[in-house]
Image (cartoon, rainbow, N blue to C red):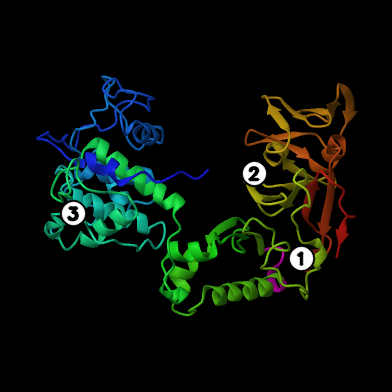
Amino acid sequence: MKKLILPMVLSSSLTVAGLVPIPFNEQVAVVEAASSFKDLPSDYHALKQIEHLVSKGVISGFEDGTFKPNQVVTRGQFAAFVARAMDLKGSNITFKDVKSGNSLYTEINKAATAGIIKGYKDGTFRPDLPVSRSDIAVMLDRALQLKGNYTKTVSLPYSDAGSIGGYAIESVKRMAAYGIMGAAENSNKFQPATSGTRVGTVVSIYNMLQTSQTTTPSIPNKKDSELTVAQLTQKYGEEKLIARSRASYEFYEVNAIEHYHNNYKEFYDSFLDYKQMLKNSFYSQYDLYYPYVELISYGGKSYKSSEFYIKGLRFVDDEILPTNPETSSQYSIDVFLNSKDSATYLKDKVLTKRMGTLPYRENGDVMVELETLLKDHVNVTATSTKLIVKSKKTIEFTADSTKVLVDGQSVQLKTPVKKANGKFMVPLRESARLMGLYTRTFTGLDVNKPTELTRIELANYPLPADYTK
């Protein structure tokens, strides 16, 4: 549900009156998220924003039950607040005055890695200094640009606009335009050198987050090769694929937007041209290397169900390729016997799972970690000796035994259940029949091994007959 952006006047609490900043090495957050603080009345003007950010783990109160809204915030603390609010990943930039023993080391470096903070020419960040309103505007502007191309500005109405430094003036204009920061409390001034307080920083961060969630940024009229990752994502949406590696047979995930931006923008002005290249590449790889190379998912769709699919593969029968089922109640699980990775196809998405033990053939069946494959679809519980599956029927498997209980009735399997790496290895075809599920095997997909079973499919809806090439 969309939320309205709060008025700029709520940012006015960024003023300060002679308060001493907390030392950098002192813990900022010492209390778990709370719903109220004894120094904040129930009608406190920024209570909603404070409690929202507290609930998200961005900031918290003190062990005496207070929030201390007017306490000054340091540069290090503000960088940490923003890093938490943005859920930043990665941390490979450091400052020489931010040591690994400091409580905010990782968060400050995350903010630096994301380009939200820059530091000084001497390689320091000076985390213990109070953060100024100018610096708050600049940092929040950089954070906002990670979400898209937010370029709107307004003429500043502040009587002290001329005192805002050149490095910050455009950021202050954007903060005003999007309602993220406004004039200082009870004045028509911005007060760029004034230090930020805990309540003021909370309100401005909250407003920034609301802006990024409710306001669509503009996309520059430029070539795709000149756009940022955020702008490309806004233009094309999420473009993620999961594929099988020919080297390891394991799955790997690629963000196609980032892959294009980081590796191919010099060769393709258009992201769509790059994507067409990927389509053609997978088409060729299917003919050359299937089943050892495979596009598992693109945008939550199987290869055959996705826009990447090109009909008429020369050496692969199209009808054997996995597809997304037609209804939300259906699922199909594809197991490749050379890999611990499996794919589960649902109507609108593809799930990937990794088993602890490689599937293997025994007595004409395939031994698999049934618990791993089915846990998202039916009730599966395991003890040290038993695996119990509850779907249409209750099936009880026992380790090192061919005896299975089906709704309390004893049934014999041809192949005994085993345990490997703490998981039950169960004969899939026999077990599927007991559970009312369906299987389909695929033999001869590798032309050099025409009699070898390579894949097996498990589904809760009828499947075609076993496939032999």
Q: Which residues are magenta?
A: 287-292
Which of discs 1 and 2 lies nearer the camera? The answer is 2
The reply, left or right, for residue 35 in relation to residue 410 is: left
* Nearer-N-terminus badge (2/3): 3
Which of discs 3 and 1 lies nearer the camera? The answer is 3
Q: Residues within 10 Å of mark 1 (few under 14, many from 20)?
A: some
Name the amino acid, label 3.
Tyr
Q: Position of residue 78 (x, y in %)?
A: 25, 43
Q: Quadrant of residue 151?
A: bottom left
* Nearer-N-terminus badge (3/1): 3
Compared to residue 91, the image places residue 426 above or below, namely above
**Residue at screen point 43% across, 45% down:** 4
Q: Position of residue 199 (x, y in %)?
A: 26, 36
Which of discs 2 and 3 lies nearer the camera? The answer is 3
Residue sitting nearer the eye, 106 or 20: 20
Name the amino acid, label 2.
Met
**Residue at screen point 79% across, 52% down:** 326
